[in-house]
Amino acid sequence: MFDYEKIKSLNELEISVYNYIMKHKEEIRYMTIRDLAQAVHVSTSTVLRFCKKIGCDGYAEFRIMYKLYLEEETKKPKVKEIDDIMHFFQIAETDYFKHTLEKIKEVLQKAESIIFIGIGTSGILGKYGARYFSNLDKFSQYIEDPYYPISNDRKNTVVIALSVSGETLEVIQLIERFREHQCLVISITNTSSCTLAKISDFNLSYYVTEELMRGEYNITTQLPVVYILEMMGRSLK
């Protein structure tokens, strides 16, 4: 029901509807369109657009299809904690995802240097990505300082930006400075509707449920990011 192409077509508000539905699977079955709109803080029109983009004529049909979807899901033996991971691997098997990876492979093979950027957990994964690519004999480095000076000689440099939200101001500003120097940008984000994804030349999104601890610390699973980094790196062998 929620395949990759449909999710990728959703805008930021519609993604918020999708995220709410995935977090409140049982409650959704008994909510009216107005209840859902109020819970997500969007208009009923946004909910209707969401329904149409996932292939339903309206909210009534969505509730029927969603009920069938849940019934089908309960038949599958699985552990709740790995639902998001399994969903991502389904995304990774789509033609669109594989085609994007193939185009990224061509770009990375031609690059003279690769720079990883990210902050917090994404920064730690950026360091991992730089080391992993270096192990594969591709000159790579991680930039931690968001105010790092960018030299003019960067035409054959590819920047890989990591961010769960894709809205981290420091990362976006650094990417804009790299783009001024004709650097090609690849981003890895949770959704394709974020600012970082939109200003990138290539984007890979993994669409997992975003989790915050005490409303501040992001504990969203990063297993899809590790997988993407390793697939990108292994394509250079």
Image (spheres, helix red, strand yellow):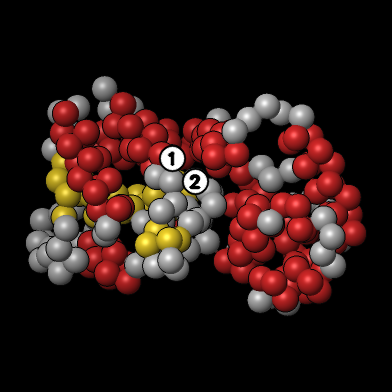
Q: Depth check: 118 or 79 in front?
A: 79
The location of residue 235, given as percent across then percent down, is 33, 27
The location of residue 3, given as percent across then percent down, is 66, 42
Residue 221 visible in the current orientation: yes
Q: As displayed, is residue 185 above or below residue 198?
A: above
Q: Badge 2 local density, few (<14 within 10 Å), some, or many (20+)?
A: many
The location of residue 142, given as percent across then percent down, is 17, 49
**SS for dot 1:** helix
Taking the image as shown, residue 66 lies to the left or right of residue 222, namely right
Residue 16's quadrant in the figure?
Answer: bottom right
Residue shown at 23% from the left, 62% from the top: 178
Q: Are marks 2 and 1 in contact (CB under 8 Å)?
A: yes
Taking the image as shown, residue 194 lies to the left or right of residue 174, namely right
- Which amino acid type corresponds to the residue marked 1 in the rendered image? Pro
Residue underneath mark 1: 224
Residue shown at 32% from the left, 71% from the top: 169
* Residue reaching furthest to the front: 214
How many labels, in total?
2
Residue shown at 41% from the left, 53% from the top: 219
Q: CA distance from mark 2 to mark 1?
A: 6 Å
Name the image quarter holding the C terminus: top left
Q: Badge 1 local density, few (<14 within 10 Å), some, or many (20+)?
A: many
Q: Earlier in the sequence, mark 2 or mark 1?
A: 2
Q: As displayed, is residue 176 above or below residue 69?
A: below
Q: Depth check: 54 or 215 in front?
A: 215
Residue 156 visible in the current orientation: no
Residue 19's quadrant in the figure?
Answer: bottom right
Q: Depth check: 214 or 159 in front?
A: 214
- Which amino acid type corresponds to the residue marked 2 in the rendered image? Tyr
Residue underneath mark 2: 206
Residue shown at 77% from the left, 42% from the top: 70
